[in-house]
Image (cartoon, helix red, strand yellow):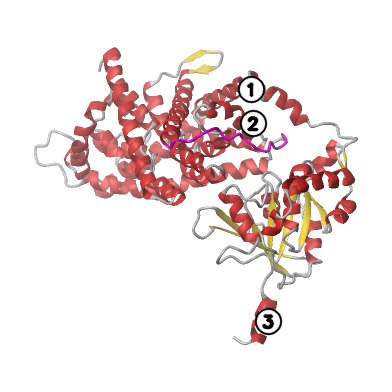
C-alpha cells in the first residue's frame, strides 16, 4: 500500500471517542443518550468483560464512534475492569484501536473523588473533554462550580451534561464538533502516571476544588441523613431483613391473580386445541408436550417480574450499595469483603452475570471464592420450582400481621442459599489459605427516586429473557422429553401408563436407584436430567411427564394438584432441599471455565454442589420421614 493511499484511508477513518469515568458517574447513561439504538455489545478478546461501542453523528454531519469503557477510579489498575480501561486508553491492547480523544465523565457532586482519574488521563497527552455530569443535582444542593475557571485550571474544555434528561448531551456534542481529531496523537507511556506520586495528585485535586467550587450554600446531602438510619449498626440490618422479607411475601400475595389468569388461559387454550384435534401423536405432542410442559413454566412469569420489580427499585434508588456495607461485617467473618455482595446479588437473577461481575474484586482469592459460591444464590430459574412445590404442599395460611406461610417458606429457602454460600466461602477461604480481610471501598451514590423508564425497561428485559427461554430452550427440551416419553409405546397388556415403558421411563427408573434414598421417584429423575440445561425446565419436564402419566383430560395448569396427590411431604421437602444446592446449569459452568481460565474449577463447582444437594436432600428426607411418616 502506497503512502498516499494510506494517508487517504487514515483521513477517512471514523474517529473513536472513549468515555471514561468513575463508577456511578452517569457515563453509561451518557453513552446511551449519544448512541440511542446504534450500539453493539461484545466482549474484549480473551476475556468476558463487556465491550460497548456505538456511533452517532454530530450536528455538522460528521460521524463518530464512541466506546464505553469499564468504570475505574484510577489507571493504576487493581481489577481486570480497570486493567482493560488502562490498556485501551494507552493503546496497549492488541487488536484494539487507540482512541482519538477522551471524554472524561465526572460526578459534579463528588469532584474530590473524580478528579484524580482526570489528572491521570491528562498525563497521557490525549485530546480531552471533561463532561461535568449531574450538574442539576449539584445546583439543587447549592454547590456552585465555576466551569470556566475549572476549564482554565485543567487546560481542557469543560462542559455541563445531564445524561438522564433529553438534550442533556448537547453541550458535549458542540465540544466534540470543535475538536480537530488529529489521528497522529498517541498516548504517552503509562510511566507518565506513576511519575507523579498519589499524594501530589490528591493535593492538586484539593487545590483545584478550592479554586473552582464553592460549598457555602450547600444545603447538605440528604443521603447522609438517610444513611444515619439505614447504615446504623443495629437498625440497618433490621431494615434490610424486613425489606427482603416483604419482597418474598409480595412474590406470592401479589402474583396470585395474574398467575390464575395465565393458568386458566393456558388450560382453556389446551382444552380447545385438544378438542379440535383427533387422537394421535400430534395431539399428544401439542396438548401434553407443549401445553403440559411449557404452560407449567409460563405461569410463573408474574412471580419473577414481581421479584425483579423490587430488586430494580432498590438498585435504581441507590440502596443496594448500602446493603453491601451492611453485609460487609458478616462476609468478613467468612473471609470475604462486602464488594462480593454485588456479584452475589446479581446471581439472584442468574449466576452467569454474577460470576462475570466478580471480576471487579481486586484480590484473586476473593474473586475465585465469590465465583464458586455465586450459584448458591437462589437464581430466578429456581423460583418456578420453589413456587410449584410450595403451592402444592404448603397451605396458603395467614400467620398474622400480613405474614403468609408460603411467603415465609420462600424467604427461608432464599436465606438457606445465602447461609450455605457463606459456609462454603468459609471452607474455600481456609482451603485456599487466604490471609487477612480486605476492607471494602465502595462509592455510595446519592439516593433518588427510581426512574420509571429504567424500571420499565428492566422488567421488559427480564420478561423478554424469560419468554425467549420458554420459546426456545424450554420448548425444544419439552418436545424432546415428549418424544422420549412417548416412544416406544406400551406393550400389549401393560398395567402402567405408556410413559413407564418409554425411553424416558427407562432412564428415570435407572436413575431412581441412585435417588431412592432421598425420596425421588422415576418421574422426578426424568425431570432432573433436562434441568441441567436450565433449572426451570424441571417444572416443564414434570408437566409433560405427569400429563402423559395422568388419566383423563389433565393438561397444563393442573401440575400442582397432580404432584400433591403423587408425592409425600418428605419427598417435596427433599426436592426443595435439592434445589437449594442443585448442580449448576451447563451454561454457567461454561462461563466459570472462561472466567477462571481452567476447567477444573467448573468440575469442582459441579461436584461440590451435587454432593451438597444429595447430602441435604438425604438428611431432609430421612428426618421428615421419621417425624412425619410417608
Q: Quadrant of residue 87?
A: bottom right
Position of 506 with respect to 21 (left or right) is left
- Residue that badge 3 annotates: 7
Name above or below for residue 195 compared with residue 561. Answer: below
* Depth order, front residue of 566/557: 566
Q: Which residues are magenta?
A: 432-447
Tell me, yes or no, whether the two marked residues, 2 and 1, touch with CB atoms within 8 Å: yes
Principal secondary structure, stretch drawn in magenta: loop
Residue 276 visible here: no
Name above or below for residue 280 compared with residue 539. Answer: below
* Spot occupied by residue 350 in the image (x, y as percentages of width and height): 48, 41
Q: Where the C terminus falls, by quadrant?
A: top left
Name above or below for residue 137 compared with residue 630. Answer: below
Q: Earlier in the sequence, mark 3 or mark 2?
A: 3
* Spot occupied by residue 223 in the image (x, y as percentages of width and height): 74, 31
* Depth order, front residue of 26/23: 23
- Residue that badge 1 annotates: 236
3D distance between C-alphas at marks 1 and 3:
62 Å
Q: How many residues crowd mark 1 within 10 Å: few (<14), some (14–19), many (20+)? A: many
* Spot occupied by residue 194 in the image (x, y as percentages of width and height): 69, 54
- Residue that badge 2 annotates: 322
Amino acid at each position: 500500500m502506497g503512502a498516499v493511499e494510506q494517508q487517504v484511508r487514515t483521513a477517512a477513518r471514523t474517529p473513536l471517542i472513549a468515555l471514561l469515568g468513575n463508577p456511578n458517574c452517569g457515563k453509561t447513561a451518557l453513552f446511551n443518550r449519544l448512541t440511542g439504538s446504534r450500539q453493539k455489545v461484545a466482549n474484549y478478546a480473551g476475556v468476558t468483560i463487556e465491550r460497548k461501542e456505538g456511533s452517532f453523528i454530530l450536528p455538522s454531519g460528521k460521524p463518530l464512534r464512541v466506546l464505553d469503557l469499564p468504570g475505574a477510579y484510577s489507571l493504576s489498575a487493581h481489577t481486570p475492569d480497570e486493567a482493560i480501561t488502562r490498556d485501551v486508553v494507552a493503546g496497549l491492547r492488541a487488536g484494539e484501536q487507540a482512541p482519538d480523544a477522551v471524554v472524561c465523565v465526572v460526578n459534579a457532586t463528588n469532584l474530590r473523588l473524580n478528579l484524580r482519574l482526570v489528572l491521570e488521563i491528562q498525563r497521557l497527552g490525549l485530546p480531552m473533554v471533561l463532561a461535568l455530569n449531574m450538574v442539576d443535582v449539584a445546583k439543587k444542593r447549592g454547590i456552585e462550580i465555576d466551569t470556566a475557571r475549572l476549564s482554565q485550571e485543567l487546560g481542557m474544555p469543560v462542559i455541563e451534561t445531564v445524561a438522564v434528561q433529553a438534550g442533556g448531551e448537547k453541550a458535549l456534542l458542540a465540544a466534540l464538533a470543535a475538536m480537530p481529531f488529529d489521528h497522529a496523537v498517541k498516548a504517552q507511556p503509562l510511566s507518565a502516571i506513576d511519575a507523579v506520586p498519589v499524594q501530589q495528585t490528591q493535593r492538586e485535586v484539593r487545590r483545584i476544588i478550592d479554586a473552582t467550587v464553592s460549598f457555602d450554600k450547600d444545603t447538605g446531602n440528604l443521603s447522609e441523613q438517610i444513611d444515619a438510619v439505614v447504615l446504623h449498626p443495629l437498625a440497618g440490618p433490621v431494615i434490610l431483613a424486613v425489606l427482603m422479607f416483604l419482597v418474598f411475601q409480595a412474590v406470592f400475595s401479589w402474583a396470585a391473580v395474574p398467575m390464575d389468569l395465565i393458568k386458566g388461559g393456558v388450560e382453556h387454550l389446551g382444552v380447545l386445541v385438544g378438542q379440535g384435534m383427533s387422537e394421535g401423536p400430534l395431539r399428544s405432542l401439542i396438548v401434553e408436550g407443549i401445553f403440559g410442559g411449557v404452560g407449567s413454566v409460563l405461569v410463573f412469569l408474574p412471580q419473577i417480574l414481581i421479584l425483579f420489580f423490587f430488586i430494580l427499585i432498590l438498585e435504581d434508588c441507590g440502596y443496594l450499595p448500602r446493603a453491601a456495607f451492611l453485609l460487609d461485617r458478616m462476609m468478613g467473618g467468612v473471609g470475604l469483603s462486602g464488594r462480593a455482595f454485588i456479584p452475589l446479588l446479581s446471581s439472584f437473577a442468574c449466576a452467569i452475570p454474577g460470576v462475570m461481575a466478580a471480576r471487579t474484586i481486586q484480590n484473586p482469592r476473593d474473586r475465585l471464592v465469590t465465583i464458586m459460591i455465586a450459584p448458591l444464590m437462589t437464581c430466578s430459574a429456581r423460583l418456578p420450582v420453589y413456587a410449584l412445590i410450595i403451592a402444592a404442599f404448603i397451605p396458603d395460611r395467614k400467620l398474622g400481621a400480613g405474614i403468609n406461610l408460603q411467603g415465609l417458606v420462600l424467604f427461608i429457602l432464599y436465606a438457606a442459599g445465602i447461609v450455605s454460600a457463606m459456609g462454603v466461602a468459609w471452607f474455600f477461604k481456609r482451603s485456599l489459605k487466604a490471609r487477612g480481610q480486605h476492607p471494602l471501598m465502595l462509592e455510595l451514590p446519592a439516593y433518588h427516586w427510581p426512574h420509571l423508564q429504567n424500571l420499565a425497561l428492566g422488567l421488559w428485559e427480564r420478561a423478554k429473557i424469560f419468554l425467549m427461554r420458554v420459546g426456545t430452550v424450554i420448548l425444544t427440551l419439552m418436545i424432546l422429553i415428549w418424544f422420549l416419553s412417548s416412544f416406544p409405546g406400551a406393550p400389549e397388556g401393560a398395567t402402567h401408563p405408556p410413559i413407564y415403558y418409554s425411553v424416558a421411563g427407562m432412564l428415570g427408573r435407572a436413575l431412581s436407584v441412585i435417588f431412592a434414598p432421598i425420596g425421588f421417584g422415576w418421574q422426578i429423575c426424568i425431570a432432573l436430567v433436562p434441568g441441567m440445561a436450565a433449572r426451570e425446565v424441571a417444572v416443564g419436564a414434570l408437566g409433560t411427564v405427569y400429563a402423559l402419566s395422568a388419566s383423563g383430560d389433565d393438561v397444563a395448569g393442573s401440575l400442582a394438584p397432580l404432584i400433591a396427590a403423587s408425592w409425600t411431604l418428605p419427598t417435596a421437602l427433599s426436592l426443595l432441599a435439592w434445589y437449594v444446592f442443585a448442580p449448576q446449569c451447563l451454561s454457567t459452568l461454561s462461563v466459570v471455565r472462561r472466567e477462571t481460565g481452567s476447567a477444573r474449577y467448573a468440575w469442582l463447582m459441579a461436584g461440590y454442589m451435587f454432593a451438597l444437594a444429595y447430602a441435604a436432600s438425604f438428611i431432609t428426607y430421612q428426618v421428615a420421614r421419621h417425624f412425619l411418616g410417608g
